Amino acid sequence: MTDYKLMQGNEACAQAAIAAGCRFFAGYPITPSSEIAEVLSRLLPQVGGRFIQMEDEIAGMAAIIGASLTGVKSMTATSGPGFSLKQENIGFASLTEVPTVVVNVQRMGPSTGMPTSPSQGDVMQARWGTHGDHPIVVLSPSSVRETYNLTVEAFNIAEELRLPVVLLMDEVVAHMREKVLLPEAEDIKVSNRPQPEPGADREGYLPYRHTEDCVPPMASFGHGYRHHVTGLFHDESGFPTNDHDEADQLMRRLYDKIERNRQRLQKLKEESIEDAEICVFAYGSTARSALRAVRDGRASGHKVGFISTATIWPFPDKAIAAVADRVQKIIVPEMNMGQLVREVQRHACGKAEVISLPKTNGQLLTPDEILGKIEEAL
Amino acid sequence: MSKKPIKVMKERCKGCDICISFCPHSVLTKGPDGKVVVSDPDACRRCKLCEHLCPDFGLKVLDTDAVDDPDEEAGSDD
Amino acid sequence: MADVEKYLRAHTLPHIWCPGCGHGTVLGAVVRAVDRAGLPHDKVVVVSGIGCAARGAGYLDFDTLHTTHGRAIPFATGIKVANPDLHLIILTGDGDAAAIGGNHLIHACRRNIDMTVVVFNNNIYGMTSGQYSPQTPQNGVATTAPYGNIERSFDLCSLTREAGATFVARGTAYGAVALSRYIEQGFKNKGFSFIEAISQCPTYYGRRNRFANPVKMLEWQRDNSVSVAKAAKLEPAELRDKIITGVMHQSQEPEYTDLYKEIIAVASKRGS
């Protein structure tokens, strides 16, 4: 039955996870993400899935990696302080190429911050929070419906590329309620990790084979492959190595996983870009205010355009460079002291003036604030 | 008793002296290469204490005539 | 008697542990216990953290998972809850389990989740070259306790018993045969099983604390072990610095994944 529902962002995330095939959640309560855990604690056993509230955030991340290794799609959800705690194990998932979805509902930070106020302060942390060079994909929704879509996408990307995917929500998207028309189950495309062919030669199985597409088939624990998974650098067999050439090869394959999939990962929305002289580039909740501001600006006759990205990492570098070629100024409103704007500056290469519009008092950026910046820039 | 009651996997032996020291019948000694040698095979009672104590999976007591659990020997608590 | 070779990844041997390290002996006890318990080879998953003990996972021919420091138990919890048909064996050290991993140990006991944790307790952080651990005796010398350790240790068997483990035992590398029996019993217990295996680190703990060689350390284990039955008749003063060995506790309690199956049954009826 298709009908509109009034749904909270966090609930949409939980519903989408189920629709995407998630059958395991492990996490820890933290504002403003706890509703995701609460909804899944109710929904998962209804579909034969399993929910467990772990003793801490670190354990939550560990448990979902363990579950995923048995072939089960798994997810955790947290906010800033918990996201910080999870970093070591996020790196483990990245290096061992275990598909997982990590939801971080951003709140004002740093530290305990303002638990019930939004921010976009974890953008850089989502990319670099764990030590060492590592691939990661980070998505950020602007609406309840987009939260649903991107949660499904997060699972699909995690499965297709065998890595942790961070869904970077913020407190506003998470707690607001919007009218949504959810897709039918049969219309939801769901991806699964590549696995060894059934009956394939167990002796010859290499869990970390440097395949052409950079994503080695992943055997599940309990299927008789008896393979080794370690956070130490390893060769194709999965066993630890200190060989520098092996390390180089693994690192490059992990990075190539992202590089060769940039098109697939890119999720841009544009409006009124064609003749724009000024462009506003935004993401997450801020994109809603930015779009309103751009439309108001256009109504006043300003040649202003709008670009938003739902994929934060990998950053849409080529798209931004192309925009910088065509416009004179790019305004980047963010609920932080200026994080993603650095990437815009880097890829604009001076071809357009990049203007940061930071707001970090725990409140949303309003359309008027953004319009004010547009008018100031004219 | 077989002439070769114990198989020594020399590539695994690290010459720690544990099997030599705890063998109740002084069957084992250290060879010139620092690895274990079955120097008195006839004394071996196949109690398998050496096999259990070896930290390196380096010893295998052959011929299953031997007592399965050397519980009466050193290695158990009462 | 077990042919242990079929449980070993022969190409990974000889292992990295020092000559005379007790960990190989303890690992042998684990493997023989797997054989005696008849655990299905493809359904065993060995999970370890970080440290010398944790390296044990790599040498065994099962599905093996070598995780982050202190976190083997929550990784294993995820595996077990997602697939309760798997048999979980955790290999951990005294630092890994009792310091950084302490919280996870406590809660796994509390949940009585069906897994067997074997702590290779050598009273030191060996992999990082000899710092003191929560199991280093008071006055023991270590690289970060050059004047002698002022901290008390604590009894992991008492701790896990109080936290809810339904099988608790202690053995020694010296008593490898009995140790293997305790581990086997742990496998057979449907619930959280904890076995503390006293092991020796001759290279770091041994040398700094006047043990001339590994044999002396095993002799010390032999000479200072007291069975549970005997310990019950002794005064606390007589038990100081002794190793109480045997089965400390056994009980039957509902197991976590069994309880969750009931939740699934209830929820499936309710929701649609």
Image (cartoon, helix red, strand yellow):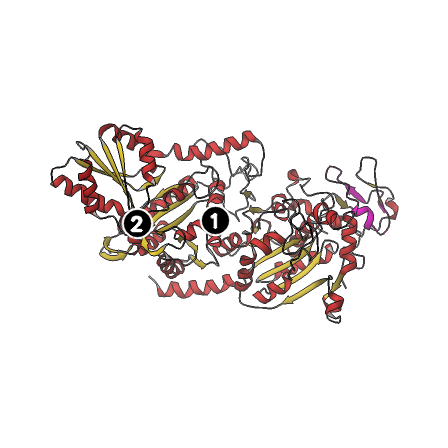
Residue type highlighted by circle 1:
Ile
Residue C88: percent from the left, percent from the top? 57, 54
Observer-nearest of B7 and A369: A369
Q: Is residue C141 above or below residue C9?
A: below
Residue type highlighted by circle 2:
Thr
Indicate which disc residue A147 carries.
2
Q: Residue at x 76, y 52 (%)?
A: C217
Q: Residue at x 75, y 56 (%)?
A: C221
- Return the residue at label 1: A65
Tell me which secondary structure the magenta stretch mostly adopts: loop
Residue C91 in view here: no
Q: Is residue C166 above or below residue A2?
A: below
Q: Residue at x 43, y 56 (%)?
A: A27
Mark 1 chain: A
C-alpha separation, residue under disc 2 versus residue under disc 1:
23 Å
* Left or right of residue C155, residue A135 in this image: left
Residue C28 in view here: yes
**Dot 2: few (<14), some (14–19), or many (≥20) neighbours within 10 Å?**
many
Number of marks present in the image shown: 2
Quadrant of residue B29 in the image?
top right
Residue A209: percent from the left, percent from the top? 50, 35
Observer-nearest of A170 and C13: A170
Secondary element at image label 2: helix
| Label pair 2/1, CB-CB below 8 angstroms | no
Which region is colored magenta? B1-27
**Dot 1: few (<14), some (14–19), or many (≥20) neighbours within 10 Å?**
many
Mark 2 chain: A
| Marks 2 and 1 share the same chain | yes
The stretch drawn in magenta includes residue C59: no
Residue A297: percent from the left, percent from the top? 15, 40
